Image (cartoon, rainbow, N blue to C red):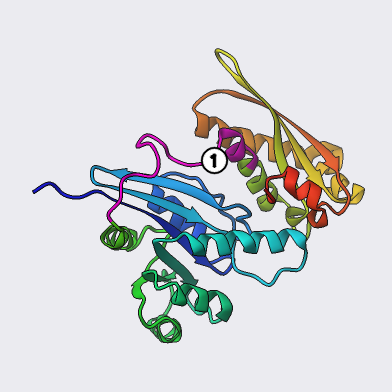
């Protein structure tokens, strides 16, 4: 008897900085979501598509759950809520020792009656006692969830999570062509690579006050020429981004170019410019321009 095809949307949710993006990349097998030690790294809902002979998994990495402090964060929480509405399976990721949660989001997930996989991540190097306390706390909140302990950084137990996801998928034809990896265009990933380098190289408010957009992307025979714009909120932030004699932005550009070359498999010429848009994170028109509001 021929096996029936399964397909579904698997939405990865959790608080900021719990390793959701690392787990997404491991599950997809490609580096789609940027990864840093800073919270609030993910801004968009990023889909990664995994295909097998008889299944298709459409993963979504969503922004971390938080209490919005400005307009853009309100929009990010809309991405989380939309992911809750169309999920076929939830992967709820928490970190060992974590006890902060949004009861509103958890109630929405439980009330949806959608299968939940509860993942306690970052178990590497943690004591059995702390892991056990974390398990008790979260399984009390979500008693019907299937429980796993993982280290996304090391790839520990990720295969077991993937197998459980496939088991829980509903019978369905594929939602996307079998050769697609993601729903995002190349320019999106280029801008995310640059934004990742900003997160890694600057401190305090700078990483959260910037947005990156690819202005031009020109493929030639032996090189791809890219012009990217970094938008920030104040002239003082622009000066910090540039750094002494331009050293800071040069470092960002070099690191980003190297990663972009590895990502597209081709030599890259990368030009980065910086522009100031005052208070863009609270401006609906600018948020729409950057793809946060449709």
Q: Is residue 65 placed above or below 130 in the rendered structure?
A: above
Q: Which residue is drawn at 70% across and 64% down?
A: 74
Q: Residue furthest right?
A: 235
The overriding secondary structure of the stretch rendered in magenta is loop
- Please name the residue shown 45% across and 47% down the image: 48
Can residue 100 be seen here? The reply is: no
Instruction: Indicate yes or no whether the magenta region holds residue 176.
Output: yes
Q: Where is residue 247 in the image (x, y as percent from the top left)?
A: 78, 39
- The magenta segment: 171-191
Question: Considering depth in this image, is 182 or 7 the residue closer to the camera?
Answer: 7
The picture quadrant where one finds residue 73 is: bottom right
Q: What residue appears at the point 41 percent right and 36 percent down from the top-left corner?
A: 180
Q: In this view, does 174 lie to the left or right of 220?
A: left
Q: Which of 13 and 244 is in front in this view?
A: 13
Q: In this view, does 119 lie to the left or right of 84?
A: left
Q: Is mark 1 on a helix, strand or loop?
A: loop
38 lies left or right of 51: right
Residue 207 lies, in percent from the top left, at 73, 54
């Amino acid at each position: 008897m021929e096996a029936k095809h399964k397909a579904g949307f698997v939405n990865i949710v959790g608080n900021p900085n719990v390793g959701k993006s690392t787990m997404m990349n491991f599950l997809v097998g490609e580096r789609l979501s940027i990864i840093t030690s800073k919270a609030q790294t993910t801004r968009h809902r990023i889909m990664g598509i995994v295909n097998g002979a008889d299944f298709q998994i459409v993963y979504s990495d969503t922004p971390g759950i938080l209490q919005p402090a400005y307009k853009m964060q309100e929009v990010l929480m809309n991405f989380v809520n939309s992911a809750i509405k169309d999920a076929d399976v939830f992967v709820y990721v928490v970190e060992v020792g974590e006890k902060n949660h949004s009861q509103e989001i958890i109630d929405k997930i439980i009330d949806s009656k959608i299968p939940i996989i509860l993942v306690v991540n970052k178990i590497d190097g943690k004591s059995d006692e702390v892991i056990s306390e974390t398990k008790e706390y979260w399984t009390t909140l979500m008693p019907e969830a299937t429980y796993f302990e993982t280290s996304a950084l090391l790839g520990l137990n990720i295969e077991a999570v993937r197998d459980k996801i496939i088991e829980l998928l509903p019978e369905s034809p594929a939602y996307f062509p079998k050769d697609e990896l993601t729903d995002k265009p190349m320019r999106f990933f280029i801008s995310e690579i640059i934004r990742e380098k900003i997160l890694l190289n600057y401190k305090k408010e700078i990483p959260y006050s910037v947005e990156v957009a690819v202005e031009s992307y020109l493929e030639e025979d032996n090189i791809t020429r890219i012009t990217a714009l970094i938008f920030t909120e104040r002239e003082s932030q622009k000066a910090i981004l540039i750094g002494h004699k331009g050293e800071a932005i040069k470092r960002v550009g070099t690191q980003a170019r190297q990663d972009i070359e590895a990502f597209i498999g081709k030599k890259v010429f990368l030009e980065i410019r910086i522009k100031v848009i005052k208070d863009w994170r609270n401006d609906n028109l600018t948020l729409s321009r950057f793809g946060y509001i449709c």
